[in-house]
Amino acid sequence: MSSMQIKANALTLRCRKSEERIQFSPRLSFFHGEMAAGKSTIVEMINYCFGGKLVKTPAVSGEVVSVQLDLSIDNTELLIERSLDPRPPWTSRGNAEKSASYAHFL
């Protein structure tokens, strides 16, 4: 039995006034920086794309509109986008706590 290979290629933060893209290395990526620089937020955003809950810091809540994770699963390219807006336009009030999620095969 062969194992599935999942590789994160890039993370894109779509902000109110800009778009920030973090390109991951094909082999190994690591992040370093001062405290409160956003290192943990990168990991939180990846987890959020996979359906996890997001701890919204003031910076994230005030700026980030959506997050996109570009990844490869074996030989298939996939783009997952998740909105930080708790009420996308097509969501009913009874479902307001859910965020919009999209998955696109590239």
Image (cartoon, rainbow, N blue to C red):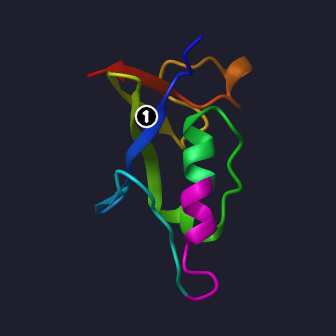
Q: How many marks?
A: 1
Q: Is 10 left, or right, of 58 in this rendering?
A: left
Out of 63 and 81, give the one closest to the viewer.
81
Q: Is 1 left, or right, of 5 in this rendering?
A: right
Query: What x and y, as percent, mark residue 81?
Result: 43, 34
Residue at screen point 56% across, 21% down: 3
Out of 27 and 77, give the one closest to the viewer.
27
Q: Is 7 left, or right, of 91 in this rendering?
A: left
Quadrant hosting residue 1: top right
Magenta segment boundaries in residue numbering = 34-43
Q: Residue furthest bottom?
A: 34
Query: What x and y, as percent, mark residue 5?
Result: 49, 29
Quadrant hosting residue 77: top left
Quadrant, the C terminus:
top left
For disc 1, the marked residue is: 81
Q: Is residue 106 above or below residue 70?
A: above
Q: Is 58 left, or right, of 23 in this rendering?
A: right
Residue at screen point 44% across, 24% down: 102
Question: Please, what is the three-letter code of the amino acid marked with disc 1?
Answer: Glu
Q: Is residue 72 above or below residue 14?
A: above
Residue at screen point 70% across, 20% down: 95
In magenta stretch: residue 21? no
In magenta stretch: residue 37? yes
